Image: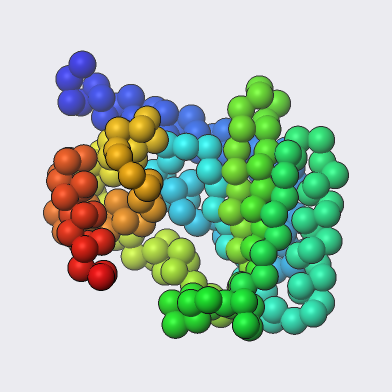
């Protein structure tokens, strides 16, 4: 297979996943459910056109993470748990004393959802509720990454993410943002270069 054919295949798979994600969100009525609490925005790979796995990230901007919002998010988790397509719902409170990295992340409430679509494919949702959107990294990435995402960069990112999803990497799986940073900011051009960059980055943190 030529490099051009390989890139085309990656793009076709990515577009297929995005279409499936759109259909699943519609089937669950998720936009309407989240809009009752705040303003939902699709973030991450499904918003950037960089999907290789059936994972969907959504950030919901709320007026305030007060008791009313806390209750609404918990009730939404319960409502989702009753849906026949939902396998599990995890709630997490990352506000106040539970925010372990307040310098890096704003306070937030989180729902982690596993779901099976009508064709039997499993999905995960990571849904964050925040009231300081200017401090939320994934919303910032949505503004900054597309400006740097050339055709060649998109190809490299999809290729590296696909290789990692297929198990072509030893150790803990890196985050998608680490891949974006390596390619867009540090000129990484292959999986092996990414591994070297990641190891150097991890060493520098200690």
**Which residue sits at x=60%, y=43%?**
124
Question: Which one is nearer the viewer's eye here, 173 or 83?
Answer: 173
Colour setup of the view: rainbow
The structure residue drawn at horizontal position 21% and vertical position 16%, both measured from the top left corner, is: 1
Q: In this view, does 50 lie to the left or right of 120?
A: left
- The image quadrant that residue 205 belongs to is bottom left
The location of residue 73, given as percent across then percent down, is 76, 65
Q: Nearer the viewer, residue 90 or 179?
A: 90
Residue located at (69% from left, 81% from top): 64
Residue 121 placement: quadrant: top right
Determine the image quadrant of residue 147.
Answer: bottom left
Using residue 146 as the reference point, say whether residue 91 is left or right of it: right
Up/down of 132 relative to 26, above or below: below
Q: In this view, does 203 lie above or below 167?
A: below
Residue 106: horizontal and vertical position, in percent? Answer: 53, 78
Q: How many labels does the image show?
A: 0
Q: In this view, does 31 lie to the left or right of 140?
A: right
Residue at the spot x=66%, y=22% of the render?
A: 119
Which residue of the protein is positioned furthest toward the front in this rendering?
206
Q: Where is residue 20 in the image (x, y as percent from the top left)?
A: 57, 33
User: Can you name the residue that lies furthest to the top here?
Assistant: 1
Q: Examine the rendering and report whether any part of residue 135 can be seen.
A: no
What is the quadrant of the C terminus in the image? bottom left
- For the question of whether residue 144 can be seen, the reply is yes
């Amino acid at each position: 297979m030529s490099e051009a054919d390989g890139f085309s295949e990656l793009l076709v798979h990515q577009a297929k996943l995005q279409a499936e994600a759109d259909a699943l969100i519609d089937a669950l009525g998720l936009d309407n459910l989240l809009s009752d609490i705040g303003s939902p925005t699709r973030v991450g790979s499904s918003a950037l056109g960089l999907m290789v796995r059936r994972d969907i990230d959504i950030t919901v901007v709320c007026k305030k993470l007060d008791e009313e919002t806390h209750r609404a998010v918990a009730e939404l988790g319960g409502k989702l748990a009753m849906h026949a397509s939902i396998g599990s719902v995890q709630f997490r409170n990352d506000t106040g004393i539970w925010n372990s990295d307040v310098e890096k992340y704003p306070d937030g409430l989180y729902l982690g959802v596993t779901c099976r679509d009508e064709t039997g494919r499993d999905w995960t949702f990571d849904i964050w509720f925040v009231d300081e959107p200017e401090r939320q990294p994934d919303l910032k990435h949505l503004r900054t990454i597309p400006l740097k995402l050339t055709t060649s960069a998109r190809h490299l990112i999809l290729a590296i993410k696909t290789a990692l999803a297929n198990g072509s990497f030893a150790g803990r799986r890196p985050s998608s943002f680490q891949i974006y940073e390596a390619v867009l900011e540090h000129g990484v051009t292959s999986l092996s270069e990414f591994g070297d960059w990641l190891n150097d980055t991890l060493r520098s943190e200690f």
